[in-house]
Image (spheres, grey):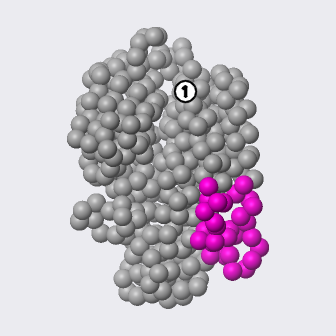
Amino acid sequence: MPAARLSVVTAVATAAALTAVTGCTQKSKAEGDAAIKVTAADSRCETSTKSVPAGQVTLSIENKGSKATEVEILFPDDRIVSEKENIGPGTEYSLTAEVKAGDYEIACRPGMKGHGIRQKLTVTGSAAAAKHDPRLDKAVAAYRRYVQGQADATIPKVAAFAEAIKAGDLTAARNAYAPSRVGWERTEPIAESFGDIDPKTDARADGLEKGQKWTGWHALEKALWQDQRIGPAEKTLAGQLVSDLENWQKRVGEAEITATSMANGAKELLDEVATGKVTGEEDRYAHTDLSDFKANVEGAQRAYELLKPVARENDKALTTELDKQFAALDATLDTYRTNDPRAKAMNGFVSYDQVSEARRKELSDAVNALAEPLSKLAAAVAK
């Protein structure tokens, strides 16, 4: 869950005109030529070129600033083609995406807040059909069905959460909180791609933009656990959460999904775990972090499994390592499951405030062991 960003989502017709391609296409630069170099700093965002051919584009990002930054490729209406969050000071990252002809922006967001510092990017021509892989079309179509299914399954669960709040039933509301978040956490990069939904539904208090009203799950989480209060304001927030998530459910079908965005999204889900769940910051009042953690991993694994046939053909060693690390992380997470009836509010996991620092380090190591090879998946499917 990143900091809020401004967005005005335009009509589906505009989306269709600028849509990213849904398969493996030609390189955005000639073989041996450099990627687009992006130099991010606290007050600047420099790019090595303003125009590339359609197809695969790779950003070679270096953060020379003093703050963690986020770099995004954006449509003119602020929908996200691809992004990388939490690029630390002094670090580098390579981001591969797929783009059709049209106008875009590359944005650097120092501190991961605000509109960001932006550079125009023009994509010309058309991608080479000869490189198109129909297996990736099937993977994208299957993933789109998965995302829509997760959104559809979320609505009745969040409605039950809201009904418990409206009834003033603190225990029932607490028990419904973690289950209501699972579908969202499995597919969060898709929701984030719209820009305006995530800040309304999943913002934490320390992630708010200046003047932004705090709404969504975490505002209710604080009321239920820290304040132990359900009043008129919380009942209103619960109704708004249902409405905002129904909006997300309806718009999922408009999401721009490509093979590389699936791969990058899987890595983003692991980043969510590393920066929010392992640290205990995400569900800091309810301590239901392990439920969100598991959902993030499940979502990443689903995207990987759909892309695996192509990735395995292009880089068998990579898929062997990913299979190993997904299995290891799943096994580690399963050790935190419990049959204790009191864990219902934790969606079957122990409360995260009961997990020692040593065991959190074990979880962090398992996440990092998976995140490193997962960062190479986009390049593997783009070969």
Element at badge 1?
A: helix
Q: Magenta span covers which residues?
A: 332-361
Mark 1, other Cα within 10 Å: few <14 / some 14–19 / many ≥20: many
**Picture quadrant of residue 130:** top right
Locate the C terminus and report the quarter of the image it occupies: top right
Residue 264: % across, % down: 51, 38
Q: Is residue 168 left or right of residue 141?
A: left
For the view shown, which residue lies furthest in the front direction? 358
Which residue is rendered at x = 74% and y = 39% of the image?
324
Q: Is residue 282 above or below residue 55?
A: below
Which residue is rendered at x = 59% and y = 22% of the image?
133
Residue 79: % across, % down: 36, 44
Locate the N terminus and report the quarter of the image it occupies: bottom left
Q: How many marks?
A: 1
Which residue is rendered at x = 47% and y = 81% of the image?
226
Asked if the magenta segment contains residue 243, the reply would be no
Callout 1 amino acid: Ala
Judging depth in this view, the residue of 88 and 370 nearest the camera is 88
Task: Read off the residue under disc 1.
Answer: 379
**Picture quadrant of residue 81:** top left
Q: Is residue 220 left or right of residue 76?
A: right
